Amino acid sequence: MRFRASAVLASALTISVGVIVILGLLLPEDLEYTGFRDVVQESAAALLQLVTITIALTIILGILNLLSVHIGRIFRRREASNASQLGALYSLVLLLGFGLVVASYALDRETSMILLETVQFPVEAALAGLLLFALVYGAFRMMRDRVTWSATLFIVTLLLVLLGALPVANGEVVQDVYEWLLEIPVTAGARGLLLGIALATLVTGMRVLIGIDRSYRE
């Protein structure tokens, strides 16, 4: 069985960094060996700062790459079809929006917040409204293909949530059911998703620490 030196070095470096960060976060403050604790915690803090800087640089490089792609679409010299011309128009709108947001944030942050409230929030509200139509259409497709108890439960829950969100007079019963759905099943589902994410992160971290997962070498 052959081992490449670069692969072994990458695995050893990754495992060492993971162990140092974990020890720096988990070592108790009342540890007898204060010198060892301080060295490990300072090393872990330096590594976390390095990760933060690396993530920031990655975001900057991603933004620059996005801008270069859209600038290339606009100034591409060739006979373009209608679809590509429309894509160039979208790219121009994106670049203008990006420049406007950066300039407003650099000059006056209050203006930037006004843009956020008048543009970003309405767009998010519109997307949330489209979610309603997607749910209704999905429910229609489910009931048209095959009527099952799960599909029926989905339809009933969807109708109750929609009716509970509407300002209907004399709808106390529906409103109570709506609040119960939000407080119990929705909260339980959200916590279950968070627990699943935490467990998946823990398992992935353990696989990296013991050298089973080597995705960082690909």
Image (cartoon, rainbow, N blue to C red):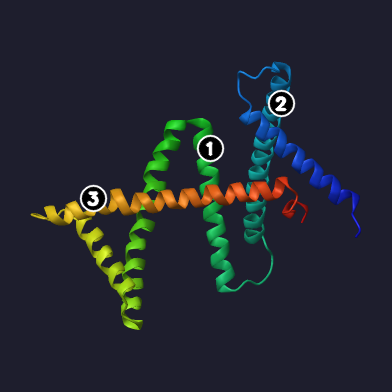
| Above-or-below relation of 15 to 26 | below
Which residue lies under the disc numbered 3?
A: 179
| Above-or-below relation of 41 to 156 | above
**In-front residue for pair 133/46:** 46
Q: Amino acid at mark 1?
A: Ala
Q: Residue at x 37, y 44 (%)?
A: 118
Q: Which class describes the residues within 10 Å of circle 2: few (<14), some (14-19), or many (20+)?
A: many
Q: Position of residue 177 (x, y in %)?
A: 20, 55
Q: Residue furthest left?
A: 170
Which residue lies under the disc numbered 1?
A: 103
Q: Amino acid at mark 2?
A: Val
Q: Amino acid at mark 3?
A: Glu
Picture disc at residue 40: 2
Q: Position of residue 105 (x, y in %)?
A: 50, 35
**In-front residue for pair 10/15:** 15
What element does badge 3 sit on?
A: helix
Question: In the shown orientation, is residue 158 left or right of residue 89?
Answer: left
Image marks 1 and 2: residues in contact by CB distance under 8 Å? no
Dot 2 or dot 3, earlier in sequence: 2
Tell me the distance, in whole angstroms, between the alpha carbons under discs 3 and 1.
Answer: 43 Å
Front: mark 1 or 2: 2
Dot 3 or dot 1, earlier in sequence: 1
Tell me the distance, in whole angstroms, between the alpha carbons under discs 1 and 2.
Answer: 42 Å
Q: Residue furthest bottom?
A: 145
| Above-or-below relation of 170 to 149 | above
Question: In the shown orientation, is residue 68 left or right of residue 211?
Answer: left
Tell me the distance, in whole angstroms, between the alpha carbons under discs 2 and 3.
Answer: 48 Å
| Quarter in which the C terminus is drawn | bottom right
Image marks 3 and 1: residues in contact by CB distance under 8 Å? no
Front: mark 2 or 3: 2
Q: Position of residue 143 (x, y in %)?
A: 31, 78
Whether residue 123 is visible, yes or no, is no
